[in-house]
Amino acid sequence: MKVKNILDRYLVMGMLLTAGLSSCEKYVTIDVAPGQLSAEDTYATPASATAAVLTLYSFYNTTQYSLPYFTVTGALPADELQYNGSTADNLEFAQGSVTPGNVTLANNFWYYPYVVIREANLAIDGISKSTTLPDSVKHQLTGEAKFFRAYYFYFLVNYFGDVPLAVNTLELDNARLARSSADKVWAQIISDLKDAESMLPSAYASSSAYPRSRVNKYAAAALLARAYLYTKDYTNAETEATRVIGAADVTYSLPALNSTFINTSPEVILQFSTQFGYSTLFGSSYRSSSATAVPLYTLYPGFVNSFETGDQRATNWVDAVVSNGATFYKINKYKLATATAGNEYNVILRLAEQYLIRAEARAALNTNLAGAQDDLNAVRNRAGLAGTTAATSAELLAAIAAERKVELFGETHRWFDLRRTGTLNDVIGGVKASYRSATKGLLPIPTTQILVNPILTQNEGYN
Amino acid sequence: MELLVHGKAPAHGRSLPAKLLFIMRLTAIFILAASLHVSASGYSQEVTISSRNITLEKVFRLLEQQTGYSFLWNEQLLDKTSTVSIDVKKASLTQVMDLCLQGTGLAYRIRDKMVLIEAAPSIRAEPSTMALPPGEIHGRVVNEKGEPVESVNVLVKGTGKGATTNANGEFKLSKVDGNATLVFSGANIETYETVLSGKVQVTVTVKTKVSALDEVQIIAYGSTTRRRSTGAVSSVTSDDISKQQITNPITALQGRIAGAVITQDNGLMGSAVRVSIRGAGSGVSMAGYVPLYIVDGVPFTLFNGGFPATDNLNAYGISGANGGISPLSMINPDDIERIDVLKDADATAIYGSRGANGVILITTKKGATNRTIFSLNANHGIAKVNHFIPMMNTPEYLAMRTDAFNYAGVTPTTANALDLKVWNQTAYTDWQKWAIGGTAHTTNATASVSGGNAQTKFLYSSTYRTEGTVYPGSYNNNMFSNRINAGHSSRDGKFNINLSASYSTMKNNLPSVDLSSIYNLPPNFPLYNSDGSLNFTLASPLSYLMKKYDGSTSNLIGNLVLSYELMPGLKVKTNLGYSTTRLSQTSTNPASAQNSASSTVSQLLYAKNDNDNYTIEPQVEYNRTIGRGRLSALAGTTFQQNKATGISMEGTGFSNDNLITSIAAANKIVIDYNNYSLYKYSAVFGKLNYTWGNKYFIDATGRRDGSSRFGSGHRFGNFGAIGAAWIFTEEDLFRSQHILSFGKLRGSYGITGNDQILNYQYSSLYTATSAYNYNGVSILYPSNMANPGLHWEKTTQLDLALELGFLKDRVLLKTDFYRNLSTDVLTFITTPTQSGTNSYMGNLPAVIENKGLELELNTINVTTGKFRWTTSLNLTIPRNKLVAYPNLANSFYSSSYVIGQPANVQMFYQYAGIDPKNGLPLFKDQNGDGQMTYAADRVPANVGHPFYGGIGNSLSYEGLRLDFLFQFSHRMGYRNSTIGTYPNTNPFGFTYANQSKEALNRWRAAGDQALYPAATVASSTSMQDFIYYSSSAWGDASFIKLKTVSLNYSLPARWVKKINFTAVTFYAQGQNIFTWAKQKYTYDPETSVSGADPGVGTGRYMNFPPLRTMVIGVNCSF
């Protein structure tokens, strides 16, 4: 009797305790905050999955992330852009001798591209696991995600050479990766772009209110053409560029110079629409809201001598401001400097480059030099210049290089072109006293990253 | 305090109705009397009566005359014929009352200045009405005030027999010889002997020893005294606080508490305060080390999942020049009675999860059972920056820039060298004087009224404070704070209710950017261009003045404590707390304040944030005497919720800059952030305390905690501690000596936890935001890297202490040794950014040891009749070490941590001076491989604080009193914030930035044996990176501050009385008077920059300094 009483008592106490603790457990279990979704829910509906993929476009299109730096700061080491500000990090870029402790380098050049790559990896994984998304949506979104992964690896491999190849969702494993050879990175870029090209439709997914601002099949092909060109796979470069130039279901053509950079331009293959409140990153960097003020980035005075006489790009795409007795040459491709709603977006891929890619591929293959001349002339004629006089493969390659300089300036091509054509040391060595040729045009791996992942090796010329 | 004393009980209790009537009548009289007899002090309480056979009535009349106390009795109760014989000299009132009521069946109560005579309650008398077995003695021990004295040892002299008094001062002895001598002794009483002479009921009045050891200390869920405490507790009292000119009460602890490093981020009003107790948070970047603040029982740590972990009110809002806003700046220092800092596991473990970083208990002032007191404290003062950084003048600056161009072989032009080619070559502005050279005015007024009687007490206080800034222009901070504390207890003392509530509002207007940051503008920088527009070549100081920040905060804290004594020894109690803080902010960036070279869009940041916090803590408390010891037990549960919600918007495109503070006038509105942060916490806890005599104390606490910040399976953690103390001077061995008046050994061991991390980190989430959108679609982005295994951080804490008192406690020394081992340290674990994230919330496998020695010494150096000089010293010798880190070599921290070194180890290239040939810095190639590599060529530097502390003195002569406190810190750190520390990592003259005078010691020409490298406009790894990661600017960064000087003069009591005041004090006080620092190249060696430093105030980055404040004021009460 007594024993039973005691047992009963313990039983009751135990039950009370369990009830108490389970109510505690319930009390401290909370729902996710409003405004948040689990990964599974995110990729359950077309609308939320699309919102997740649009992240790839949006964050990195504002003034803070990678693209503004890739296109502007990253172009500083070359011989086209002069920096007129006093920010120490940018001055290092302008001198062509970035130090490994540079914070812009660590964040905007190294970290943020990987942020986009991680988000693309998560999207590819999330979409593939979704059981509710229709196939058409899966193809569209996966294609876009793969394009972005390729696009950011393209910058990484160009700025740093060998880089860690993080292509899955296991962040902690990716964190420990060593640098993969540039060849492997290029192979990944090409494979992703081929997938994207095959998955994406020709039609732009963006509405007419935001023309050509989502990745389509031709955007993937255009970037793929560039990737083949950089890896010297000229046959494939020609094929991909031809696909874009010859597209029948989307009209791509070269309009007048002054219409090239407006957002309804038929030349645009891909453009990123502006965030409200932000101007195009090119416009805000190269222009100033006051006509008399000196923008932060202007062309080197010597650069304007590169234009042939009669080149209308020298007048349409360049203008000048005089300050303290010195002349500063402004890039005038984009006309709007401020954030007021306008008709300009950030142009990412355009047709003129495809002509120049195909011209270069044909010249290098030395099989269709006439075709190369035609392509080159398509660009020259639009600028009001006569057809090229270059006839041999070597002459054509030199002419194409010169044409790229005056056609694509301010669009982040110059530095990469000099590097891939092996002319960097000759050209920059003459322009910048502090340029260090031992670096072979590669940026240093950020010190902070070598500290946390010692398996990373430093690039040459930085020890 | 109400007390009831009875003599020998009558054989029969009185009938209830008569008694009730009597009580009611008495109460009415009492209330009337209490309101009329507001002041009767000044009468002597010492009584001398020598009379034989006088009636009780006469005795009472005599006592009335001698003590000033009023006597009230029911005529029917008093037997007019019975008489007593009394012969006492200088006895206390209670002694006389005890004597004369003995055996009369009467009892008395003393309330305020009244003595109420009533029938002894029959219930209490019950045990005594039974005939006691032969040899059994019942007794009671009271002090001079008639209050029962607990834990008195009662010994039967010459035998081993003894007992200890209970909470009512009662004791029982059996089998005692009728003529035995009883010896009463205790920690805080003077030893007393009495001979029984056949008595079986005794009431003994003992004398209290007055010692600092017996001051009440507030501890977790209760109070104790320093003498009896088993935990490591350090305190400051309202007396210490009132000597300082501070606006945040936590800063009153600076230099006064051993084991705590306390800094304010900057000297601007409202700015964040960082407290690190016993090294919490040192070394491990970003781990939360915010201690648990408890204000009158309500948790007030408003940590709302911000990152890095802070309790800043604006964690999700906007920051103005003052950075983070401390919620504690809303608590008026004048309202605070005492602040107790609990440091070891014994003291903190009862708070479980929340106690790992230490606990700071803030107790506000309560009303007193006394007459009504009005008091007023008002002061006015001025404040200035007390240290400016020595910077180069114009010729020195221009020479450096010229050298820099020459060295790099670059020609200065009007494009790349405005300072040399365009700006006036002789202009000079001292930018520090321009920006922060002004004088700030402060005014502070507090008025309070308090009062009460034995059952009800209240205090109301109200403060208004206005502070200016030293910036050019008119900026200020106004605070209005109100507090009420009220308590009531039922007549039988069983039911108690206590309410405290405070409401304060603060309005702060400041520039949105701290102007002290312009110290390194070139001295010839012109504010305007030649065309009259603002010069934006560098940040325009004038534009800073146009960007305004406004913040309004209101804060309500309410706390209700209800308790009821169910039966003797058993009490139920509930603690209900609620606090709510509302913060609304605007920050403007008008188009006119922007550089027209880049985009100019007028912008308004607008934020509203609310933080609501409630806590419910039902508890059961049980006390009983077991043997000679006393057991007290406490059990309870906690439910706590913290909800932070807020919205942060950005409006752009205003048609007119005058409309800029209205979000409705914006062309476009973006919601930057819509914060929702919910934290729930629940726990069950228990506490057992056993006291044996006045010698042995044992304390055990346990707690099971659940936190919503962890995922399923990891939500609960168990925490607990045991502590013990032994007052060895209570042993017979020590009775014969007089040098050591107090000696205690104590120790504790326990485990505490920490959950100061962001909410929802255990699961992977996508966050929706319209702040970023694409093609008009709001995006969803992966906001974190999930860590489902996230669990509690645990710290095992050991504390051993020796406390000694010498020469009747005139010298008190407390020495604590502590060792805390932290495991599963919660932090944002840094990841290589190639993973796409720079960190994730996780438990670091590291074992980090914080150990140290704390010393507190209080001495009364001189105490004569009028002159008194006391000194207090505290010293802390802390050590921090990374004890273990499994597989460190393969972790992300392989190059940041070294096992056996402090966790905040700094790995540096060893600076080897300047190459006289070319002015380039040299570094030691540690492994001799001919090149500098991060992995192999860096060595650990000396880090940390070898010691720190404070020394205060107080001198008084009659009404005059002088107090001053020095705070000192011997520590390693950056010796020059202008050189070699981010963002000053560039060579001298690299860009438009002035340098400190140290740059004069640079290399200029071949052969120079210089201290610093050459000036150059060319970037180079050795000049920038290597120097930044080198020991060149590292070393002894110690400092001493004359923190506080306070001079008070109290008017003599007789003067004050004439004007019907009780006290009038005039004072002059100064705060942050002077700093002697090795590091002259920062404003103040202790400031921090929000988000920059992981640790507390290193002074590494320059920030607005605490001002030298001097005030005069008056404090009076009547």
Image (tube, coloured by chain):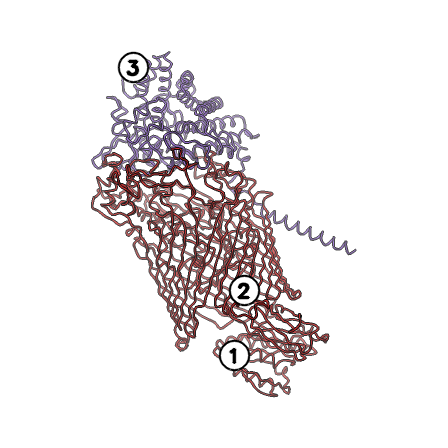
Chain colours: A purple, B red
Q: Whole-percent x and y of residue B432? A: 29, 50
Looking at the rendered structure, whether the residues under marks 2 and 1 are on a common chain is answered as: yes
Residue B662 seen: yes
Q: Whole-percent x and y of residue A359? A: 35, 17
**Is the C terminus of chain B in the top left, top right, bottom left or bottom right quadrant?**
bottom left
Which residue type carries mark 1?
A: Gln
Residue B421 lies, with reference to residue A249, above or below; the image says: below
Label 2 sits on residue: B743
Q: Nearer the viewer, mark 2 or mark 1?
A: 2
Q: Chain of mark 1?
A: B
Cα–Cα gap, marks 3 and 1: 119 Å
**Picture disc at residue B45:** 1
Asked if the residues shown at circle 3 and circle 1 are in contact, with their CB atoms under 8 angstroms apart, the answer is no
Q: Whole-percent x and y of residue A159? A: 39, 29
**Picture disc at residue A390:** 3
Decide which of A194, B653 is in the foreground and name it: A194
SS at mark 1? loop
Tell whether B1071 sits left or right of B784.
Answer: left
Residue B138 lies, with reference to residue A198, above or below; the image says: below
Decide which of B652, B146 is in the foreground and name it: B146
Cα–Cα gap, marks 2 and 1: 33 Å
Q: Nearer the viewer, mark 3 or mark 1?
A: 1
Which residue type carries mark 3?
A: Ala
**Picture disc at residue B1085:** none
Q: Whole-percent x and y of residue B1026? A: 37, 38
Cα–Cα gap, marks 3 and 2: 101 Å
Which residue type carries mark 2?
A: Gly
Q: Chain of mark 3?
A: A
SS at mark 3? loop
Residue B839 lies, with reference to residue B289, above or below; the image says: above
